């Protein structure tokens, strides 16, 4: 069976709605991001490559600051971190959420103020805790009962560390089962339903080395609806009222985590930032008034919504193959730089850049170069019927949880990160070379 050729329509190939705001069309099918032609980035830095639009990252940080005045906005470093990103986040006035000594040390050695850092982790290593205390992080989020005595001992008799408690508010939300963290029965946080949150809080308050400043929750990731956040907020305020009643302690801070969903393809829903902010503010004011609590300082921890839409992945087509009724377009990257389709079934919208094609659109499956059939970057996408080896494909919304989750699979080396801004491209993180891989292999 042959696949019919249909004219390329404005909706499938020309819709740039999920691309960075700076994206501009160039003659002959070119695209520029941050004033730089993507074809030129590919020429200069090779492929695969991850392009990060500095202006888009900064604009997203500002949008958060504007939407949440009087709240702390902490960028979740796990989405993507490098020293330039640290500087942008710092300059835009955000804080940072880290979950390892690695993320923390990178941020602080790049000049990020440690008091604006919150450290998370369901299983913090001795190294994580040592690093957090030595560098002086603002807050450590307690995720389990065994951490309390351990952390208090590490702080020592003369120190005092501000901490929060991660609570599971019993709200199920998130784009995939693997990234839902708001209910009992998963590894994060302490439940108020079975009393373990209350128990941990009571124990914490007996430790003079630890100063409990607030509660934290993170219900999941890639959430596109405000209601789960509202439900979580209510549970959290209820628990804050319980803490006040039981211990006479009014907690000054409430961190509602991240998880704000974005569109990966045109037409997909995204969480509206201003709507979320307004709703949370009203709900927080009302709920606190009803409970007779002063309104705590709010914090949010977006990762994906800051970095995701600012990134574009560039791949070179290596082979085009028709098998049965399917066309496989294989590129020079894949699940080692983007495990997300394999892990969470995410669908991306790649497009041809740098060449104008007059061929009609044909359905294709964009696959990677790795040695398994599940190495699919995008299934059932419309690409020009004359797509061929040497063509350049660009995948938008590639800035979060791709490079940061890249692996050493098949020893192809991790791609570079390239910043584009004001018509200039500059290397942020260089490509991992075969020499890098060999140099770690020190056995005989
Ligand atoms: N705060 C905490 C405590 C978190 O665990 C996370 C994400 C965030 C904030 C930021 O969530 P975001 O705004 O980026 O959704 N690898 C998965 C996502 C895992 C998210 C883990 N925690 C993915 O590629 O979809």
Image (tube, rainbow, N blue to C red):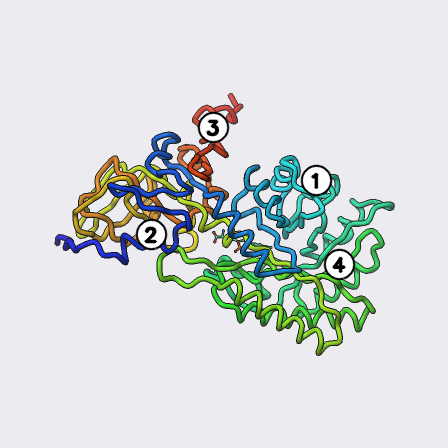
Residue at (61%, 37%) from the top-left corner?
106
User: Who is closer to the viewer here, 119 or 300?
Assistant: 300
> Label 2: few (<14), some or many (≥20) within 10 Å?
many
Choose the circle earlier in sequence order: 4 or 1: 1
Q: Are marks 3 and 1 in contact (CB under 8 Å)?
A: no
Label 2, label 1: how many angstroms apart (C-alpha)? Answer: 40 Å
Q: Would residue 86 be found to the left or right of residue 376 on screen? A: right
Mark 1 residue element: helix
Residue 209: x and y, percent? 82, 51
Q: In which quarter of the image is residue 84?
A: top right
Choose the circle earlier in sequence order: 2 or 1: 1
User: Who is closer to the viewer here, 265 or 191?
Assistant: 265
**Residue 370 visible in the current orientation:** no
Mark 3 residue element: helix
User: Who is closer to the viewer here, 86 or 29?
Assistant: 29
Q: Is residue 341 above or below residue 224?
A: above
Q: Which quadrant of the picture is home to ligand 1? A: bottom right
Q: Are marks 4 and 1 in contact (CB under 8 Å)?
A: no
Label 4, label 1: how many angstroms apart (C-alpha)? Answer: 21 Å
Q: Are marks 4 and 2 in contact (CB under 8 Å)?
A: no
Q: Would residue 127 be found to the left or right of residue 83 on screen? A: right
Instruction: Give the number of the disc on residue 437.
Output: 3
Residue at (51%, 26%) from the top-left corner?
441
**Residue 328 visible in the current orientation:** yes
Instruction: Give the number of the disc on residue 336.
Output: none
Residue at (70%, 40%) from the top-left corner?
131
Q: Name the residue under label 1.
A: 131
Q: Name the residue under label 4.
A: 213
User: Who is closer to the viewer here, 138 or 440?
Assistant: 138
Q: Mark 2 points at which residue?
A: 349
């Amino acid at each position: 069976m042959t696949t019919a050729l249909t004219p390329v329509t404005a909706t499938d190939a020309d819709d740039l709605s999920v691309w960075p705001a700076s994206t501009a069309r160039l003659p002959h099918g070119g695209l520029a991001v941050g004033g730089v032609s993507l074809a030129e980035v590919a020429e200069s830095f090779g492929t695969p490559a991850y392009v990060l639009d500095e202006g888009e990252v900064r604009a997203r940080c500002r949008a958060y600051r504007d939407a949440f005045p009087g709240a702390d906005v902490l960028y979740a470093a796990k989405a993507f971190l490098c020293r330039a990103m640290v500087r942008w986040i710092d300059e835009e006035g955000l804080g940072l959420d880290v979950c390892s000594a690695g993320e923390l040390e990178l941020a602080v050695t790049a000049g990020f103020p440690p008091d604006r850092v919150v450290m998370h982790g369901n299983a913090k290593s001795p190294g994580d805790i040592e690093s957090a205390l030595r560098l002086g992080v603002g807050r450590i989020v307690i995720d389990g009962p065994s951490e309390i005595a351990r952390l208090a001992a590490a702080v020592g008799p003369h120190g005092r560390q501000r901490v929060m408690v991660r609570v599971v508010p019993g709200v199920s939300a998130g784009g995939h089962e693997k990234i839902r963290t708001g209910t009992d029965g998963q590894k994060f946080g302490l439940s108020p339903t079975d009393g373990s949150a209350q128990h941990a809080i009571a124990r914490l308050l007996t430790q003079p080395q630890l100063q409990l400043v607030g509660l934290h929750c993170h219900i999941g990731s890639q959430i596109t609806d405000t209601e789960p956040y509202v439900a979580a907020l209510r549970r959290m305020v209820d628990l804050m009222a319980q803490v006040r009643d039981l211990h006479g302690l009014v907690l000054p801070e409430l961190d509602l985590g991240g998880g704000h969903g974005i569109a990966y393809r045109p037409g997909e829903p995204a969480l509206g930032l201003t709507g979320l902010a307004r709703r949370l503010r009203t709900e927080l004011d009302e709920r606190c008034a009803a409970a007779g609590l002063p309104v705590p300082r709010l914090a949010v921890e977006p990762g994906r919504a800051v970095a995701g839409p600012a990134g574009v992945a560039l791949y070179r087509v290596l082979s085009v193959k028709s098998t049965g009724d399917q066309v496989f377009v294989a590129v020079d990257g894949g699940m080692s730089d983007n495990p997300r389709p394999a892990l969470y079934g995410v669908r991306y919208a790649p497009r041809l850049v740098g060449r104008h094609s007059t061929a009609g659109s044909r359905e294709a499956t964009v696959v990677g170069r790795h040695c398994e059939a599940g190495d699919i970057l995008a299934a059932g996408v419309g690409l020009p019927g004359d797509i061929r080896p040497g063509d350049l494909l660009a995948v938008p919304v590639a800035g979060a949880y791709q490079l940061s989750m890249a692996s050493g699979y098949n020893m192809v080396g991790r791609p570079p990160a390239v910043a584009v801004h004001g018509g200039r491209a500059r290397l942020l993180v260089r490509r991992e070379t075969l020499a890098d891989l060999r140099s770690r292999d020190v056995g005989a």
